[in-house]
Amino acid sequence: MIMSAYELSLIAIVSINVMLALSLNIITGLCGQVSLGHAAFFGAGAYTCGVLAGLGVPMYATMAAAAVVAGLLGFLVGLASLRVREDFLAITTMGVGFVFVGFVRKQNWLGAEMGLSNIPDHGLGETGFVVLCIALVVLMSLLTIYVKHSWLGFGFTAVADDEDTTRTLGLDVASYKLTAFVLGTLLAGVAGTLYAYFTRFLVPGAFGFGISISILAMVIVGGVGSVWGVIIAAVTLTLLPEFIRVVNDYKIFIYGLLLLLTMRFLPGGLADLARRRHLLFGYKRSG
């Protein structure tokens, strides 16, 4: 079955959003560090790719460079996270997002307000690019699952549950928080590379606060820490505006409302809902 250009584009953007949700899930879902500026790292990767691709750097090298730049920015923000927690951390990361957009808007070499255009084609063709996107989603999913069930993931969970108790147990809380930020932002940089090649045109507004809220909504609605829940939420929230026009017209409002409703009535997200249904039907069968 041959897919249309629209269907291939839809798969590509869904894949990019899944990668962004998975990357934030490492920081917020596994390590408990609330980030309201994740779009900044996404944008750092995208603009790094755009600049280097314009200089003739091949795709694999631009992707590696974008991941490094986004990871370094994540490391710097992670350092700030060592001194602040919870609400103050959320405000700090939100500030990073605004600073990034403001910085890009003043840089002529990044296109400023007019945007960075004429990004070279990736050379893979539409089908080849979509295959690459799907392959990277699978790799990131497997990496997240591995991290979650590794000793690193156990350390993240301990930090998320209680930093002070974790510190008294002899675990290096600072190292875990920095690792989470670097790993999560590095993966966001990879997603930024795909976005740059996909759109071939970058504007500061594409990485604003609304995008960070959208990514956070995917993580919260899916269930913080849940890999499959986050993937399902990312796919659903990406496709919803495509098929229901009113969602697209009021996307940020609806995403914000979903965040509030999920945190109030279903704190564990879709993953917790699935778990409850499993327990309920399991109880009925045993009964």
Image (cartoon, helix red, strand yellow):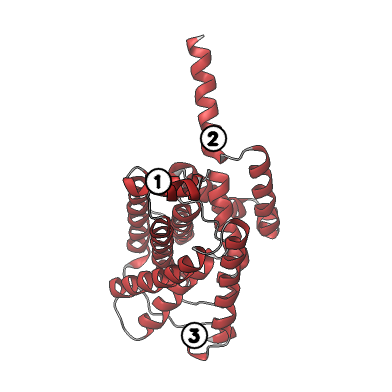
Residue identifier under label 1: 169
Mark number displayed over residue 110: 3
Q: Quadrant of residue 211?
A: bottom right
Q: Residue at x 46, y 51 (%)?
A: 31
Camera-side residue: 61 or 181? 181
In this figure, what is the number of numbered marks? 3
Give me the residue at 44% from left, 59% from top.
Answer: 12
In-front residue for pair 233/72: 72
Asked whether disc 1 touches disc 2, contact meaning CB atoms under 8 Å apart, the reply is: no
Given the image, on which type of amino acid does mark 2 rest? Answer: Asp
Residue 196 in view, yes or no: no
First along the sequence among labels 3 and 2: 3
Q: Position of residue 250 (x, y in %)?
A: 70, 58
Looking at the rendered image, the disc whose residue lies closer to the viewer, 3 or 1, is 1
Residue under circle 2? 272
Q: In the visual, does 173 lie left or right of 287?
A: left
Q: Residues within 10 Å of mark 2 (few under 14, many from 20)?
A: some
